Amino acid sequence: MHIGGVSVSLILHGLFILALVSIAPRLLDAPQEEPPITVEIIPFVAPPPLEAVQLAEPEAAAPPIEPPTPQKAQKALKQPDGMIHSNRIYSGEVLQRPENAEGLKEYRTLALDEQREQLCSLEALEQIAAWSDVYKPERMVTYSFGEVQYKGNHMIANGAVFWSHDNWHRVKFDCVLSTDQSKVESLAFAVGTIVPKSDWEEHYLTKYE
């Protein structure tokens, strides 16, 4: 099963929706119909000034360390580059659901660069949820441990974090967009360790309600 009741902040920095998408827990026995997914646009928040990033502890800038193998993983498998590569794209269908009509309308009013970040953040949350039942991704912040990079139609977020089960988890992802940047064509990601609560303030993180 891929997506549960996810409240996704389309991650305007916060997956667009930041996503947010709620993903309901997977059920072990007879499948039941899942609650509808709703999308919420998070107001744009500028990342901290470069000075703040430069003052971060060296350890904070280190790439995420892969956690233990999840209890349940779907068909998306780790490749030689250490990343989990998508074998299905979810963001398009999530945005087109009737219950997300208002979120989609607001999304379309955003600047193009904000749209692509929201879209990739939403896709990353959906991919994590489909990959493992260990996580319930609810919000993505793309810049907490490093600036987002853009290379052509690639959005590369090596310093992102996502909210799941009352903790921020480190994650990096590479999102490939279509030429007009209106849809995600592929996404690769690697989930890292939980961010200690003692580091939240330094990286402008707070409890997600």
Image (cartoon, rainbow, N blue to C red):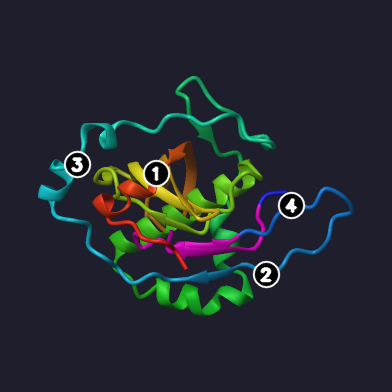
Query: Could you classify mark 4 by the number of other residues whose Cα lies within 10 Å: few (under 14), some (14-19), or many (20 or more)?
Result: some
Instruction: For mark 3, give the secondary structure.
Output: loop
Q: Residue at x 62, y 76 (%)?
A: 98
Can the viewer see residue 157 in this picture?
A: no
Determine which quarter of the picture holds residue 35: bottom right
- Viewer-nearest of labels 2 and 1? 1
Residue 126 image position (x, y, % from top left): 56, 52
Magenta highlight on residue 7: yes
Q: Which mark is residue 195?
A: 1
- Between marks 2 and 1, how big is the CA–CA gap? 30 Å
Give the mark nearer the N terminus: 3 vs 1: 3
Q: Are marks 2 and 4 in contact (CB under 8 Å)?
A: no
Give the mark nearer the N terminus: 2 vs 1: 2
Instruction: For mark 2, give the secondary structure.
Output: loop
Q: Which mark is residue 56?
A: 3
Query: Could you classify mark 3 by the number of other residues whose Cα lies within 10 Å: few (under 14), some (14-19), or many (20 or more)?
Result: some
Give the mark nearer the N terminus: 3 vs 4: 4
Give the mark nearer the N terminus: 2 vs 4: 4
Q: Which mark is residue 22?
A: none
Instruction: Compare residues 122 and 111 and report the one nearer the observer.
Output: 122
Residue 186 image position (x, y, % from top left): 49, 42
Residue 97 image position (x, y, % from top left): 62, 70
Query: Could you classify mark 2 by the number of other residues whose Cα lies within 10 Å: few (under 14), some (14-19), or many (20 or more)?
Result: many
Residue 52 image position (x, y, % from top left): 15, 49
Can the viewer see residue 81 in this picture?
A: yes
Tell me if residue 117 comes above or below residue 99 in the rendering: above
- Start-end of magenta stretch: 3-22
Give the mark nearer the N terminus: 2 vs 3: 2
- Viewer-nearest of labels 2 and 3? 3
Q: Which residue is the extreme one toward the left? A: 51
Give the mark nearer the N terminus: 1 vs 4: 4
Q: Which mark is residue 26?
A: 4
